[in-house]
Image (tube, rainbow, N blue to C red):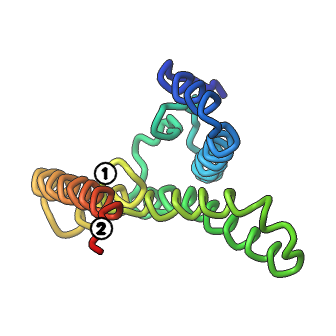
């Protein structure tokens, strides 16, 4: 398994180190790698081969040869990564239950994994939620209509995320 590192990924890591965010950056990278390992292990169990993981400034992506995969298996494969994030959140929350003192050391892991879980389940292709939506829509619509629908949903999700980002920091008082 090869790991390909995008040059901007290194730049983001350097900026994180310079401005005091290196621990959070490392936690996010490890969370993303665990997420991708969920996809890789699921693909291997289904008999598909994965060749590399690409680390990019906005996340990670596993490259797998899944030609000929059935829609049901693609849904299972898409859910494998978010399932890892969900299990990580449950494990950390369980750790807090039994050992509350660990909260100070593990809260970043929980929130990073929860954010990755929520983000990846958005119905925007090529995120996992978008792959699931594509499989669901392909049962009812023609391939061209599925692509147009997913593009429209992608645009709506991007607009919603930008609005949330800007409106979240507005003071209305």
Which residue is labeled 2 in the image?
Answer: 136
* Quadrant of image for the N terminus: top right
Where residue 120 appears, x then y in whole percent?
Answer: 44, 57
103 or 109: which is nearer to us?
103
Query: From mark 1 to mark 2, how far is it between C-alphas?
Result: 13 Å
* In the image, residue 33 above or below residue 146: above
Is residue 40 visible to the viewer in this orientation of the structure?
A: no
Seen as rendered, the residue at the extreme top is 7
**Which quarter of the figure has residue 91?**
bottom right
Sooner in the amino-acid sequence: mark 1 or mark 2: 1
Q: Is residue 11 left or right of residue 150?
A: right
Q: Which mark is residue 125?
A: 1
Which residue is depicted at the point 76% across and 61% down? 106
**Which quarter of the figure has residue 51?**
top right
Q: Tag 1's secondary structure?
A: loop
109 or 163: which is nearer to us?
163
């Amino acid at each position: 398994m090869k790991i390909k590192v995008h040059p901007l990924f290194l730049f983001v890591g350097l900026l994180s180190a310079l401005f005091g965010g290196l621990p959070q950056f490392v936690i996010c990278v490890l969370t993303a790698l665990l997420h991708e390992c969920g996809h890789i292990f699921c693909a291997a169990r289904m008999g598909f081969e994965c060749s590399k993981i690409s680390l990019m400034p906005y996340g990670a992506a596993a490259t797998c040869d899944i030609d000929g995969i059935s829609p049901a298996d693609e849904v299972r494969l898409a859910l494998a990564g978010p399932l890892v994030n969900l299990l990580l959140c449950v494990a950390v929350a369980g750790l807090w239950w039994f050992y509350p003192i660990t909260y100070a050391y593990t809260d970043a892991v929980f929130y990073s994994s929860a954010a990755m879980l929520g983000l990846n389940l958005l119905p925007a292709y090529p995120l996992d939620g978008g792959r699931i939506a594509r499989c669901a829509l392909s049962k009812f619509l023609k391939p061209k209509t599925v692509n147009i629908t997913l593009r429209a949903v992608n645009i709506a999700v991007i607009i919603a995320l930008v609005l949330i980002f800007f409106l979240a920091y507005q003071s209305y008082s």
